[in-house]
Image (cartoon, rainbow, N blue to C red):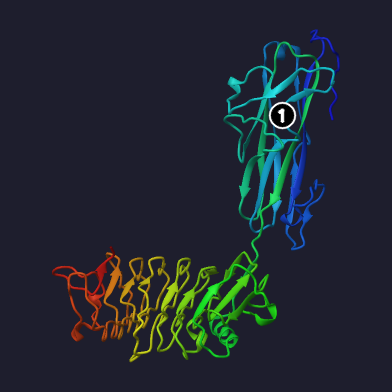
Amino acid sequence: MIKGLRKPPFFSGQGPVIIVIGLIIASLCQFFLDRTIVFAAPLISGSGTVLSTSVSHSTVSLDFSAQEFRTAAFKNSTIQYHINTTNATGAMSYISSIDEDTHLNHSDTDIHQKFESISISLPETSFAPKTWGYRKSKTSVTGNFNPIPKRSNPDLLYNETTAVNTSYHIDFGVKSSPDLIEGTFEKQIVLTTIANPVPTTATLQNGFQFSNIVYNLNPNHDTENFKPSATPPANLATAMKISTSSSMVPVYAWYDNSDKTVYWWSDADIVYADQNSAYMFGRINKYANPLKVIDTRGINTSRVKMMTRMFYAGRWPIKEIILNEFDTSNAEDMSEMFAVDPFSTVTDLPEPLNLTSFDTRKVTSMRSMFSGTYNEEIDISSFDTSNVTDLSYMFDDSKVKKVYAPASLNTANVVDSTDLFHDAVNLIGGHGTTYSIANASNLNYFKIDEIGSPGFFTTAP
């Protein structure tokens, strides 16, 4: 620490005033948040994540000559704060005083004169005498200065959301005063960087393996519901893992006979469905008995490419499918996704199928997607069919009465529309166009029904 003159009388015109700002750096990985680690070397977590920080100067020293503080001169000095982390989710960096006192205090405790922190953001030209502040930048430091934050309420410098190797520029500004007492005014500033938490993840088995495990949870094969649980199983011995061996934490599923429900639970922050989730839910009973509710909430489907027969349940349409959080942004194949075997006899009709959250920009096949379905209404108003090549049998033998669609559907890449609407005899367009066998494969009817331009779809309400 730099020591200045310690002379109790007011400035006599002989001695200087020295401003010293000491910098303390602390870097913490999320794995060690229960203790503070002051860096001398890079911190390496148990997972191999590296976080290191350093400063270009451990102190900032501003020397004011007699002439400078007679004129209440302003001075500033910049340090570089370097951050390097391999943490995939980056790190957050903060600045604060070492305690609740944000003043620059005289090194002689018998002298009570001090520099106060500015209280609002200010340009240097608006600083009052005996005040100070800081500002930050990732490039050249310009603009207003900020108040010095207390230890209990640090300022966020920057939040990096990926692995990064960068430097921040931190500039401290001080306004002197003609009545200063000679000596050293000092304060310690703490720079803290904390690695952002990395979410724990799990991945479910591929669709076929997943359905086999869930099928075997109930020897009677009459499961009615599949739902997430907010709590782990009461008896882990009755549960089975439905996650891959490479998952960070397991996912468990178990059958509750009291409500004929298969529940699942995991301590993971994110539970992903496998890229190949074909046959995932429809085979829970292997088509022996009907399913009432499939609740997909809590399962992140953003990685899924293959959704073939995902909800196909043989001759039993699933009564209700909850798709509130269903992410189809990477889906490529939706063939037979909601299909039902033809010639089924169903009296308990399923709920309308609301697919307005679906992103289908990458989908290439919608073959038999709604073939045989009993949903009287299907909403595909968010669909983008610009990459679809196969629309064959999409609504084949469907009992649907009304299909809500977007204003336009791009079918430029479609090469197969065989029996697109075959035997969808209940389907009526928004202006009353009814099914005709002559138009069962007519791609021109894959649009909103309008006067003078017939189609089989309806504008969404």
> From what the image shows, is residue 87 above or below residue 58?
below
> From what the image shows, is residue 419 above or below residue 330?
below
Label 1: which secondary element: loop
Residue at the limit of the structure toward the left, as seen here: 452
> From what the image shows, is residue 400 above or below residue 128?
below
Question: Which residue occupies 19% across, 78% down?
Answer: 434
Residue 282 in the figure: left or right of residue 138: left
Q: Amino acid at mark 1?
A: Thr
Q: Residue 54: where, in percent of width, then height?
A: 75, 44
The N terminus lies in quadrant: top right
Q: Residue 426: where, in percent of width, then height?
A: 24, 81
Q: Residue 410: where, in percent of width, then height?
A: 30, 69
Question: Which residue occupies 33% across, 92% down?
Answer: 343
Count all numbered tags in the image, as a single digit: 1
Question: Which residue occupies 20% across, 86% down?
Answer: 437
Residue 111 in the figure: left or right of residue 118: right
When asked about the image quadrant of residue 31, the answer is bottom right
Q: Residue 454: where, in percent of width, then height?
A: 18, 73
**Few, some or many C-alpha atoms within 10 Å of disc 1 (few <14, some 14-19, many ≥20)?**
many
Residue 142 in the figure: left or right of residue 2: left
When asked about the image quadrant of residue 409, the answer is bottom left
The residue beneath circle 1 is: 102
Residue at the limit of the structure toward the front, as seen here: 258
